Amino acid sequence: MEGSVTRTPTGASVLRGSLGAFRGRLTAAAALFGGHQAGEALVPVLVGVVIDEAVGTGSTTALIGWLLVLGVDFAFLSTCYRFGARQAWHADVHADARLRMQLADRLLDPRGGAEADRLPGSLATVAVSDAKRVAIVNFMLPLGVAAIAAVTVSAIALLTISLPLGLLILLGTPPLLWLVHRVGKPLEKRSETEQERAAQASGVAADLVSGIRVLKGIGAERAAMAQYVGTSRTALGATLRATRAEAGFLGSVQLANGLFLALIALVGGRLAVGGEISVGGLVAAVGLAQFLIGPLQVFGFVSARLAQGRASATRIAAVLTADHTVGAGHAAAPVGVPAGALALRQVSGGGLDDLDLDVPAGQLLGVVAPDPVQASALLRCLGRESEPESGRVELDGTPLADYPPDLARAYVLVAVHDAHLFVGTLRDNVLAGGVPAGGVPAGRVADRDLDRVMAAAQADQAAEALPQGRDTDIAARGSSLSGGQRQRVALARALAADAPVLVLHDPTTAVDTVTEAEIAEGLREVRHDRTTVLVTTSPALLAVTDRIVVLESGRIRTEGTHSDLLRNDPDYRALVTG
């Protein structure tokens, strides 16, 4: 909407948004909890009335009548709490889910950026632990309002019983609340540090678990263990400091509450001895003083949860406001399937230096990049994971950046070397690649020849080795498969997408040479009318390409066919055959 101002979320706005989204339920919960606390405060008052009006006078009728009133009060306060708790818990649970959905939406934004410099475990901590800490404020805040209602009702009752006692409550509570707020500030700071350290430890743990096979393969288990132990100890230290801060905070609150209540009891006792209040009034005053322990403790608990909630809201806001790595793009999808002519115009950044490259539609191009940094930079640019520092990538003459990221990635599909498989059957994983994205006018998977892409990627052999063939369930990240099986299934998934431009990065590093040669032939056959870019040093794959470009210092050093380069370029020959 033109002229509107988009406000950047902050920790305070995240917390306010979590509360504001359920203001109706929170209002109802606060009112019901307030009724519960008012009913609780009236219990010692009614007991005092029973003593003065029934026990002191010996009236059976008055005793029965006031006991009935007391019973009605108990029914009232019980009902209020029951329905108030339902409203508060509903707001808490749904606020938690709402925050997780907001984080998921940001993490899944095609423009990316939220995951930058954050390990998966760290993001999981934000989405689970921090979201819950913010959401629990929705339950605690009505309790805080109810505690204020309890103090108010108690003060009014005490003013009725004795003006000095009532004034003591009214004048003493605000300084007590201010003290609770001030003491809670260090807890907020340490809580944020605790969450940061815990997130870092979770991130390192998730990273190590995902790469456990690689670590074992290179014998780096001890180094990995040492890294995790160090991170875990740092997180433990932060947690202990935060816990000590919370214990000190709650202990200080308890001490302040105890001194305040002792003062109330002392003043009430002196008034009773002086005959200024009745026996029932003294009982009521002492009962109210004991009752006030609960509401005053609630102030401490609410303040602690608010401190933790504010710290966690700040961490959530940091994820929600992370800069996007690529632009939104607004170009409409072209009519029909793009021809697939790919071009890089003076692309620089991440190891590339004014790279110019033209790939005609339908060509099978090999890209040899001795420096992995340059290969990664090329893949990020083509996959719209990052914007080049300068220059542009074009598809059929249109800058790729003009398209929305999801549409651009559907047109130019980059299948990375370590592609993940998902929970589900082998068939589901392969068919997942054929769902059109961003309005791409491609055929549905059911209309494609699944056997053809499975055979081209030699994934049919992988399926034959499994108990239920293509219907065998695969564990998360494909951990139930061998490295070669995972690569072949991932390649079949990429081929099933039938993208106008397909970029493959070392798709056969975990298969034997015979299988690799068969995959190379199958790949050429399946993609004969589509543009394909192979970023690899595999001689079997490079042998089936139409043309090869060799990168050096971020630019094209030389180009030609595989046979010509083998014959005329010693550096190329050493690289791909060594």
Image (cartoon, helix red, strand yellow):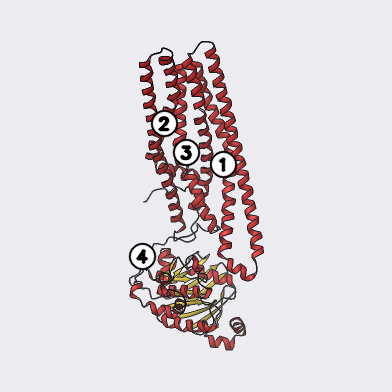
Q: Nearer the viewer, mark 3 or mark 2?
A: 2
Q: Which residue corresponds to the image point at 41% horizontal and 78% vertical from the top-left? A: 453
Sequence order check, earlier mark of 1 and 4:
1
* Residue at 38%, 20% in the rendered image: 66
Residue 55 figure quarter: top left
- Sequence-first disc among 3 and 4: 3
Give the residue type at disc 1.
Glu
Q: Where residue 229 sits in the image (x, y, percent)?
A: 64, 56
Q: Secondary structure at mark 3?
A: helix
The three-letter amino acid code for the residue at tag 4 is Ala
Residue bearing the label numbered 1: 188
Residue 150 pos. (x, y %):
45, 28
| Amino acid type at image mark 2 | His
Q: Can see residue 442?
A: no
Judging by the rendered image, the residue that carries numbered circle 4 is 332
Mark 1 to mark 2: distance in Å? 30 Å
- Calculate the distance from the C-alpha at mark 1 to the C-alpha at mark 3: 16 Å
Is 444 displayed left or right of 122 in the figure? left
> Is the residue 28 above or below the residue 390 in the image?
above
> Residue visible at 60% across and 38% down?
247
